[in-house]
C-alpha cells in the first residue's frame, strides 16, 4: 500500500505514516520506525517527531501531528500528574511527564496548558524535541 504523502515533500503540520506496531491509544508520542515511512510509540530516551492522533493496527496508515509545526496546541497523554505551566518531557509508552527526577536522557517537547492526572489527556504547546540530560 502506498500513501501519497510518504513521498519527500512538504507537509502542513501533519503527515501520514504506517504504524510499525499496533497503536492502541490516541495522542501518544511517535518516533520513526525501522523505515522513515513508519511510526511507532516513543520511549522516554527517544526523540519524538510528532503525536499520533488516532489508533492503528500494524501497517495501517496513521496521522501524526508534527511537534512544533501544527499551528495549534496538541493533546498528549500524561504518564503522571502534570500541572499547567510545567515544561513537559518524554516518558515511556509514548506519554509525557513534568521535569523527570530519575537520571537519564529525555526530550523536552513543550509546555502543559492544562492540568492532568495520570493517564489523562493534557493540552500542550509543543516544540521540536530538545535533548535534556538529568
Image (cartoon, grey):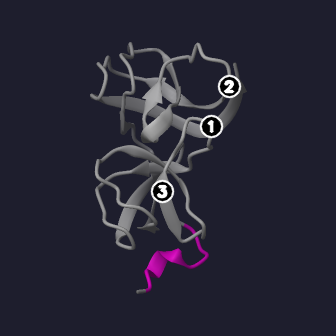
Residue 81 in view (yes/no): yes
Q: How many marks?
A: 3
Q: Quadrant of residue 106?
A: top right
What residue lies at 56% left-to-right and 35% top-to-bottom? Answer: 44
**Residue 118: percent from the left, percent from the top?**
31, 22
Q: Which mark is residue 40?
A: 3
**Residue 96: percent from the left, percent from the top?**
45, 30
Disc 3 from disc 2: Cα separation? 21 Å
Please, is residue 50 above or below residue 58 in the view?
above
What residue lies at 38% left-to-right and 13% top-to-bottom? Answer: 83
Question: In the picture provided, is 104 more to the left or to the right than 21?
Answer: right
Q: Secondary structure at mark 2?
A: loop
Please, is residue 39 above or below residue 84 in the view?
below
Q: Residue furthest bottom?
A: 1
Q: Which mark is residue 117?
A: none
**Residue 90: percent from the left, percent from the top?**
53, 33
**Residue 76: percent from the left, percent from the top?**
37, 36
What residue lies at 70% left-to-right and 33% top-to-bottom? Answer: 131
Please, is residue 112 above or below residue 8 in the view?
above
Camera-nearest residue between 27 and 125: 27
- Tell me which numbered mark, 2 or 1, is placed earlier along the sequence: 1
Q: Which mark is residue 45?
A: 1
Disc 2 from disc 1: Cα separation? 8 Å
Q: Which mark is residue 104?
A: 2
State yes or no: discs 3 and 1 in contact (Cβ < 8 Å): no
Residue range in magenta is: 2-10
Q: Secondary structure at mark 1?
A: loop
Quarter of the figure with the N terminus: bottom left
Residue 110 covered by magenta stretch: no
Amino acid at each position: 500500500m502506498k500513501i501519497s504523502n510518504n513521498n519527500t515533500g512538504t507537509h502542513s503540520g501533519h503527515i501520514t505514516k504506517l504504524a510499525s506496531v499496533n497503536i492502541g491509544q490516541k495522542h501518544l508520542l511517535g518516533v520513526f520506525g525501522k523505515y522513515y515511512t513508519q511510526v511507532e510509540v516513543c520511549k522516554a530516551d527517544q526523540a519524538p517527531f510528532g503525536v499520533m492522533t488516532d489508533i492503528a493496527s500494524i501497517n495501517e496508515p496513521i496521522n501524526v501531528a508534527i511537534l512544533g509545526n501544527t499551528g495549534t496546541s496538541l493533546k498528549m497523554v500524561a504518564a503522571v500528574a502534570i500541572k499547567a505551566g510545567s515544561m513537559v518531557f518524554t516518558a515511556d509508552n509514548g506519554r509525557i511527564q513534568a521535569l523527570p527526577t530519575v537520571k537519564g536522557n529525555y526530550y523536552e517537547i513543550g509546555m502543559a496548558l492544562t492540568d492532568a492526572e495520570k493517564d489523562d489527556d493534557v493540552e500542550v504547546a509543543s516544540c521540536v524535541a530538545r535533548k535534556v540530560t538529568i
